[in-house]
């Protein structure tokens, strides 16, 4: 028991929550450590009636509202229910616990790599497949309101399942869904411009083990993963270990005094001096503030230095994998967690699921900072985070500047030189956009052709490409939440049902159809050519308005050429230097129909105005 103050024990123990509620035999984490919430736990013992499950190492918080207990699971334990008894001098109660059958690792936990194309879906804004969950019992009506960009709009897991054929048709191979943890169902009123607002985005968990009731339930989530897998689409969970929502029960009654960095009334606000996380010279106060400060007053910061917190979060991450069979994790705001914890989490994931993949959000336009957090090398602090991937926000930023004519085209190869900082640039996740960035078509200087070149670049450059739902329609959207508009056609219910569906060709406007087909073609090109997925990237030509590079593997060479001028450009491209012999042909396979012959070690190609062309060397 923590602390020395005796607390009056009011009555028999009551259990309200067991985390995790289930586990597996022969798991790499054994014993598993349960966190039990309830009342009157002072002096409690945990007893097992089965020799298969052995409790030990009980720890109870001072208020008697939380109990930690290790459960050692005998390796040959069969799946089934193994209820425990929680006993005090005032009485006893059941502590439910189950051992589950592990999912088949041959068809789950497959990880993500450069062979994949990731598609980000903001669950609430993609498709409403089940109007019955739009307003859960007790939720205020105003919290579901499609006319308020900060209310719930009704999108859900069923909506994603219903549109798997659309996603398959587009060609993507992996879905990243915004967090499906249960969030508060209410609506916040305030005098600020961002009110009234809800947690439709899912980043304010109130239950790390619960599925958002507006999105569906665990059975629907499992169905989504199985159905996605059955059509060759992997699933990535958005996990948020850095913080929880301020409505989480822990905030008023923490399991331990140091569970969070500070309390609701006394905490630091993160000043976002992110550079202090990279610099070996940073001021310790600034460094701690960036790690320990609350992302907002509404987002209590988890204290991973407390071993019970670290253990809880590692188990929670593994529980979702084991329970749903997903293939990867996107870890939110990862740089605000200590690097030793990123390493601990990454190591635990790979120990249990060798192919498992986690990409970290290090939202920085500086490659030195993103590269510092990717695994495969040690930082100055001696830590290799083992993190599989980071998003390449610096290349995303340059691509947007280039294709809106704000930076010269040569800025692309000049940015790509910083790949020298990454142990393996093929492992970086290259984003076209996400739910935190303005959509391309709302950037100053944006044109449809610019958006088309931007997505073609994202899909042909090195790395693991990630698209954002709606970009394939050239959707518009300024800053959050305008960049989270509903997918047209996903919302057939309510007062103002969608009158057209962009999920179908008939429902798409001409520009949407043009962008859709273009995106589909570049995805297909990527999936058909291993050189684009995993070949070397070699710069061939650059000037203010054009950039040409090769993707070359041992079996093929693809040349990708961009021209942003309003007229066609004729460009001489060196071929001998990449071992393409005289007499070979460079045949356009996307964006043009020309064939050009290699003569004297070079080839002259014509890139039409404001577009990208892919060639294959034969
Ligand atoms: Ca719904
Ligand atoms: Ca909820
Ligand atoms: Ca933190």
Image (cartoon, rainbow, N blue to C red):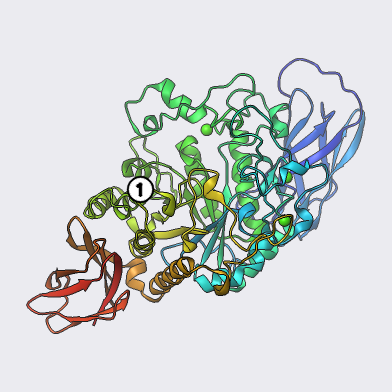
Does residue 541 appear to the left or right of 110 in the view shown?
Answer: left
Residue 190 placement: quadrant: top right
Task: Please identify the quadrant where the C terminus is shown.
Answer: bottom left
Give SS at disc 1.
helix
Task: Please identify the quadrant where the N terminus is shown.
Answer: top right
Q: Residues within 10 Å of mark 1 (few under 14, many from 20)?
A: some
Using the image as rendered, state which of residue 335 and residue 613 is in the foreground. 613
Does residue 270 appear to the left or right of 326 in the view shown?
Answer: left
Does residue 449 appear to the left or right of 537 in the view shown?
Answer: right
Asked whether residue 354 is in view, the answer is no
Note whether 42 is above or below 427 in the view shown: above
What residue do we see at 72% from left, 42% from top? 143
Residue tagged 1: 397
Ligand 1's image quarter is bottom right
| Position in image of residue 403 (x %, y %) | 32, 55
| Position in image of residue 568 (x %, y %) | 21, 69
Residue 2 placement: quadrant: top right
């Amino acid at each position: 028991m923590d602390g020395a103050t005796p607390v009056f024990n009011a009555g028999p123990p009551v259990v309200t929550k067991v985390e995790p509620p289930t586990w597996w035999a022969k798991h790499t984490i054994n014993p598993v450590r349960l966190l039990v919430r309830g009342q009157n736990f002072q002096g409690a013992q945990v007893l097992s009636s089965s020799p298969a499950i052995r409790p030990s190492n009980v720890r109870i918080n001072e208020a008697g509202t939380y109990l930690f207990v290790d459960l050692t699971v005998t390796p040959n334990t069969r799946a089934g229910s193994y209820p425990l008894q929680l006993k005090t001098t005032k009485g006893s109660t059941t502590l439910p616990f189950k051992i589950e059958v592990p999912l088949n690792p041959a068809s789950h936990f497959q990880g993500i790599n450069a062979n994949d194309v990731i598609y980000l879906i903001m669950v609430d804004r993609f498709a409403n497949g089940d109007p019955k969950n739009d307003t859960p019992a007790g939720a205020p009506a105003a919290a579901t309101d499609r006319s308020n960009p900060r209310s719930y709009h009704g999108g859900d897991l069923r909506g994603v399942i219903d549109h798997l054929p659309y996603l398959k048709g587009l060609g993507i191979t992996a879905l990243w869904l915004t967090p499906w943890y249960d969030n508060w169902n209410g609506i916040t009123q305030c005098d600020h411009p961002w009110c009234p607002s809800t947690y439709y985005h899912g980043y304010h968990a109130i239950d790390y083990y619960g599925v958002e009731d507006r999105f569906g339930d665990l059975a629907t989530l499992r169905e989504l993963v199985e159905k996605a897998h059955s059509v060759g689409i992997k699933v990535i969970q958005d996990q948020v270990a850095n913080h929880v929502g301020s409505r989480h029960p822990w905030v008023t009654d923490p399991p331990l005094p140091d569970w969070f960095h500070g309390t609701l009334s006394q905490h630091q606000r993160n000043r976002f001096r992110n550079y202090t996380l990279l610099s070996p010279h940073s001021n310790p106060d600034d460094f701690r503030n960036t790690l320990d400060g609350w992302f907002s007053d509404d987002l209590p910061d988890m204290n991973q230095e407390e071993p019970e917190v670290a253990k809880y979060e590692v188990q929670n991450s593994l529980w979702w994998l084991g329970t749903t069979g997903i293939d990867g994790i996107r870890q939110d705001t990862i740089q605000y967690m200590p690097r030793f914890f990123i390493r601990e989490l990454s190591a635990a994931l790979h120990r249990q699921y060798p192919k498992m993949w986690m990409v970290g959000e290090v939202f920085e336009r500086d490659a030195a900072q993103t590269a510092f957090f990717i695994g495969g090398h040690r930082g100055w602090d001696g830590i290799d985070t083992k993190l599989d991937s980071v998003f390449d926000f610096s290349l995303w930023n340059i691509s947007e500047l280039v294709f809106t004519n704000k930076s010269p085209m040569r800025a692309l190869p000049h940015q790509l030189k910083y790949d020298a900082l990454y142990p393996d640039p093929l492992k970086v996740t290259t984003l076209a956009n996400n739910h935190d960035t303005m959509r391309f078509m709302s950037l100053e200087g944006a044109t449809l052709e610019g958006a088309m070149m931007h997505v073609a670049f994202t899909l042909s450059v090195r790395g693991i490409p990630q698209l954002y739902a709606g970009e394939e329609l050239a959707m518009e959207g300024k800053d959050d939440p305008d960049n989270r508009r509903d997918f047209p056609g996903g919302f057939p219910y309510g007062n103002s049902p969608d009158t057209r569906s962009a999920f179908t060709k008939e429902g798409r406007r001409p520009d949407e159809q043009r962008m859709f087909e273009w995106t589909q073609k570049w995805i297909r090109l990527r999936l058909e050519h291993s050189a684009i997925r995993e070949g070397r990237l070699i710069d061939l030509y650059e000037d203010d308005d054009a950039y040409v590079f090769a993707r070359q593997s041992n079996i093929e060479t693809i040349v990708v050429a961009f021209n942003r001028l309003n007229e066609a450009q004729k460009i001489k491209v060196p071929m001998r230097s990449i071992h393409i012999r005289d007499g070979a042909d460079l045949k356009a396979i996307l964006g043009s129909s020309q064939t050009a012959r290699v003569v004297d070690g070079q080839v002259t190609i014509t890139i039409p105005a404001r577009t990208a062309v892919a060639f294959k060397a034969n």
